[in-house]
Image (cartoon, rainbow, N blue to C red):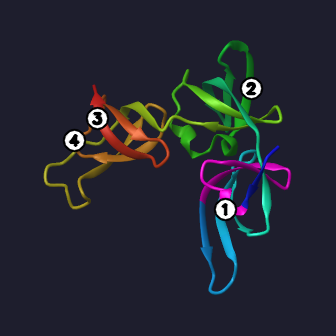
């Protein structure tokens, strides 16, 4: 168990706060007028998926969480339940909730292998791929001269997610997108 000083609580680190594991999403050390420095952070609870803000003061130390991980394969989702199995043992199936999977789950294709975090042998959140290549299943036609909205249209992907893409993207195209922001990156094929 190692303790972190207030200024060492930085992005992408895992900490234990009130007995719960958190991932540090953002941190900013600053001074308010003549006071002592403060580290204002945004923390994501790895058990519930909820994001909270917390300020660490100079005198505070926090325990660094020891997070293990394992590879799991996404199978399917149904009525808010997301089903996975262990990558090396298909008979070990388990389910998680919408909150645990997070907003990036809508870009998961069946049979995708992702990393699942474990805290004291308790399953938690997931590390999703940053990019995904998905097929466009439904796209309205791009109308010539329809650039008043910046040349964008909303399409449906094979996972059921909808995103905004440029007008030249058509049904059947395979596009690459950023799963963290849900933004279109490029067209990669048909």
Please state the horizontal and vertical placement of residue 137, each as a whole percent of the image: 37, 32
For image coordinates 59% across by 28% down, the residue present is 114
Question: Is 46 or 66 nearer to us in this picture?
Answer: 66
Residue picked out by circle 3: 187
Real-space CA distance between mark 1 and mark 2, rounded to the nearest whole angstrom: 38 Å
Residue picked out by circle 1: 7
Label 3 close to label 1 by CB (< 8 Å): no
Please state the horizontal and vertical placement of residue 136, each as a whole percent of the image: 36, 33
User: In the figure, is residue 86 to the left or right of 175?
Assistant: right
Label 3 close to label 4 by CB (< 8 Å): yes
Q: Is residue 100 above or below residue 58?
A: above
Is-magenta flag for residue 10?
A: yes
- Outermost residue, left side: 145
Please state the horizontal and vertical placement of residue 16, each as a whole percent of the image: 79, 50
Neighbor class of circle 2 (other Cα within 10 Å; few <14, some 14-19, many 20+) is few
User: In the figure, is residue 87 to the left or right of 173?
Assistant: right
Question: Is 143 or 112 nearer to us in this picture?
Answer: 112
Range covered by the magenta-colored residues: 6-26
User: In the figure, is residue 102 to the left or right of 166?
Assistant: right
Sequence-first disc among 4 and 1: 1
Give the foreground label among 3 and 1: 1
Q: Which mark is residue 168?
A: 4
For image coordinates 79% across by 60% down, the residue present is 61
Real-space CA distance between mark 3 and mark 1, rounded to the nearest whole angstrom: 41 Å
Real-space CA distance between mark 3 and mark 2, rounded to the nearest whole angstrom: 34 Å
């Amino acid at each position: 168990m190692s303790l972190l000083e207030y200024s060492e609580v930085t992005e992408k680190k895992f900490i234990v706060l009130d007995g719960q594991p958190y991932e540090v999403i953002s941190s900013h050390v600053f001074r308010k007028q003549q006071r002592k420095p403060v580290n204002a952070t945004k923390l994501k609870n790895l058990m519930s998926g909820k994001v909270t803000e917390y300020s660490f003061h100079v005198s505070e130390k926090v325990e660094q969480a020891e997070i293990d991980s394992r590879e799991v394969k996404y199978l399917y989702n149904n009525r808010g339940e997301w089903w996975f199995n262990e990558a090396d043992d298909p008979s070990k199936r388990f389910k998680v909730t919408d909150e645990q999977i997070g907003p990036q789950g809508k870009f998961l294709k069946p049979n995708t292998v992702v990393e699942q975090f474990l805290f004291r042998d308790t399953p938690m959140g997931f590390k999703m791929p940053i990019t995904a290549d998905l097929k466009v299943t439904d796209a309205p036609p791009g109308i010539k001269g329809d650039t008043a909205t910046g040349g964008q249209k909303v399409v449906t992907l094979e996972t059921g997610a909808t995103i905004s893409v440029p007008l030249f993207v058509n049904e059947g195209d395979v596009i690459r997108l950023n799963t963290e922001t849900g933004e279109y990156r490029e067209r990669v094929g048909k």
